[in-house]
Image (spheres, helix red, strand yellow):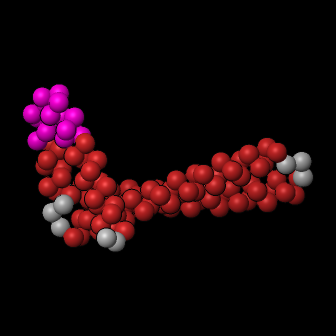
Amino acid sequence: MNRIQTMISERNDDYLDLLNYAIQLNDGQWQEEILESMRKLNASEETQQEWATTENLWRQFDKINSRLTEIYYSIRASKDDADKQRLLEQMWELKMQRIDVSRQIKSETSNIEC
Protein backbone atom coordinates (compact mmCIF):
# COMPACT_ATOMS: atom_id res chain seq x y z
CA MET A 1 0.00 0.00 0.00
CA ASN A 2 1.50 3.36 -0.98
CA ARG A 3 1.56 6.44 1.23
CA ILE A 4 -1.53 8.03 -0.32
CA GLN A 5 -3.55 4.84 0.03
CA THR A 6 -2.45 4.57 3.66
CA MET A 7 -3.53 8.14 4.36
CA ILE A 8 -6.88 7.56 2.66
CA SER A 9 -7.38 4.37 4.63
CA GLU A 10 -6.61 6.19 7.89
CA ARG A 11 -9.02 8.98 6.96
CA ASN A 12 -11.74 6.45 6.19
CA ASP A 13 -11.08 4.71 9.51
CA ASP A 14 -11.58 8.05 11.28
CA TYR A 15 -14.87 8.59 9.46
CA LEU A 16 -16.00 5.07 10.33
CA ASP A 17 -15.22 5.76 13.99
CA LEU A 18 -17.40 8.86 13.77
CA LEU A 19 -20.11 6.85 12.06
CA ASN A 20 -20.07 4.25 14.84
CA TYR A 21 -20.35 7.03 17.41
CA ALA A 22 -23.29 8.58 15.52
CA ILE A 23 -24.95 5.15 15.46
CA GLN A 24 -24.45 4.79 19.22
CA LEU A 25 -26.05 8.22 19.69
CA ASN A 26 -28.85 7.19 17.34
CA ASP A 27 -28.29 10.40 15.35
CA GLY A 28 -29.58 9.56 11.87
CA GLN A 29 -28.89 12.99 10.41
CA TRP A 30 -25.27 12.92 11.51
CA GLN A 31 -24.91 9.37 10.14
CA GLU A 32 -26.13 10.56 6.72
CA GLU A 33 -23.77 13.56 6.79
CA ILE A 34 -20.82 11.30 7.57
CA LEU A 35 -21.75 8.84 4.83
CA GLU A 36 -22.19 11.66 2.31
CA SER A 37 -18.80 13.09 3.25
CA MET A 38 -17.22 9.68 2.76
CA ARG A 39 -18.92 9.28 -0.63
CA LYS A 40 -17.60 12.64 -1.78
CA LEU A 41 -14.09 12.08 -0.47
CA ASN A 42 -13.83 8.62 -2.00
CA ALA A 43 -15.52 9.56 -5.28
CA SER A 44 -12.46 10.10 -7.40
CA GLU A 45 -8.73 9.66 -7.67
CA GLU A 46 -8.39 13.42 -8.02
CA THR A 47 -10.18 14.03 -4.74
CA GLN A 48 -8.02 11.45 -3.01
CA GLN A 49 -4.87 13.06 -4.38
CA GLU A 50 -6.06 16.51 -3.25
CA TRP A 51 -6.80 15.16 0.21
CA ALA A 52 -3.35 13.58 0.43
CA THR A 53 -1.75 16.84 -0.68
CA THR A 54 -3.64 18.71 2.03
CA GLU A 55 -2.55 16.20 4.66
CA ASN A 56 1.08 16.61 3.58
CA LEU A 57 0.73 20.39 3.82
CA TRP A 58 -0.64 20.06 7.36
CA ARG A 59 2.33 17.88 8.29
CA GLN A 60 4.64 20.52 6.86
CA PHE A 61 2.79 23.18 8.88
CA ASP A 62 3.23 21.13 12.07
CA LYS A 63 6.96 20.66 11.41
CA ILE A 64 7.38 24.40 10.93
CA ASN A 65 5.55 25.08 14.20
CA SER A 66 7.72 22.57 16.03
CA ARG A 67 10.86 24.17 14.65
CA LEU A 68 9.57 27.64 15.62
CA THR A 69 9.04 26.41 19.17
CA GLU A 70 12.58 25.02 19.30
CA ILE A 71 14.01 28.30 18.03
CA TYR A 72 11.95 30.28 20.54
CA TYR A 73 13.40 28.27 23.44
CA SER A 74 16.89 28.60 21.98
CA ILE A 75 16.50 32.37 21.81
CA ARG A 76 15.37 32.50 25.43
CA ALA A 77 18.32 30.35 26.51
CA SER A 78 20.95 32.19 24.46
CA LYS A 79 23.19 34.81 26.03
CA ASP A 80 24.93 35.72 22.76
CA ASP A 81 23.33 38.61 20.85
CA ALA A 82 24.74 37.45 17.51
CA ASP A 83 23.30 33.99 18.09
CA LYS A 84 19.94 35.49 19.04
CA GLN A 85 19.94 37.56 15.86
CA ARG A 86 20.69 34.49 13.74
CA LEU A 87 17.89 32.60 15.44
CA LEU A 88 15.48 35.50 14.95
CA GLU A 89 16.28 35.49 11.24
CA GLN A 90 15.59 31.76 11.09
CA MET A 91 12.33 32.35 12.94
CA TRP A 92 11.31 35.05 10.46
CA GLU A 93 12.02 32.74 7.51
CA LEU A 94 9.99 29.95 9.11
CA LYS A 95 7.10 32.33 9.73
CA MET A 96 7.13 33.26 6.05
CA GLN A 97 7.15 29.55 5.12
CA ARG A 98 4.24 28.97 7.47
CA ILE A 99 2.24 31.73 5.78
CA ASP A 100 2.95 30.16 2.40
CA VAL A 101 1.90 26.70 3.59
CA SER A 102 -1.25 28.17 5.17
CA ARG A 103 -2.21 29.72 1.86
CA GLN A 104 -1.64 26.40 0.10
CA ILE A 105 -3.78 24.60 2.69
CA LYS A 106 -6.56 27.13 2.22
CA SER A 107 -6.39 26.69 -1.54
CA GLU A 108 -6.38 22.90 -1.36
CA THR A 109 -9.20 22.84 1.17
CA SER A 110 -11.30 25.05 -1.10
CA ASN A 111 -10.67 22.62 -3.99
CA ILE A 112 -11.74 19.60 -1.95
CA GLU A 113 -14.92 21.19 -0.63
CA CYS A 114 -16.14 22.26 -4.06
Residue drawn at x 29%, y 54% is 11
Q: Nearer the viewer, residue 48 or 22?
A: 22
**Outermost residue to the right:** 80
In the figure, is residue 52 to the left or right of 25?
A: right
Q: Nearer the viewer, residue 24 or 109?
A: 24
**Outermost residue to the top:** 25
Residue drawn at x 31%, y 55% is 10
Please identify the quadrant where the C terminus is shown: bottom left
Q: Tell me the quarter of the picture where residue 5 sits.
A: bottom left
Asked if the stretch drawn in magenta spans residue 21, the answer is yes
| x and y, in percent, of residue 89 in the image | 73, 59
Give the main secondary structure of the magenta stretch.
Answer: helix
Residue drawn at x 18%, y 60% is 42
In the figure, is residue 103 to the left or right of 95?
A: left
State the extent of the magenta-drawn residues as a range. 18-32
Q: Is residue 72 visible?
A: yes
Q: Tell me the quarter of the picture where residue 105 sits.
A: bottom left
Query: Against 74, is 111 above or below?
Result: below
Q: Is residue 50 visible?
A: no
| x and y, in percent, of residue 101 in the image | 48, 60
Please identify the quadrant where the N terminus is shown: bottom left
| x and y, in percent, of residue 98 in the image | 54, 57
Asked if the stretch drawn in magenta spans residue 24, the answer is yes
In the figure, is residue 56 to the left or right of 51?
A: right
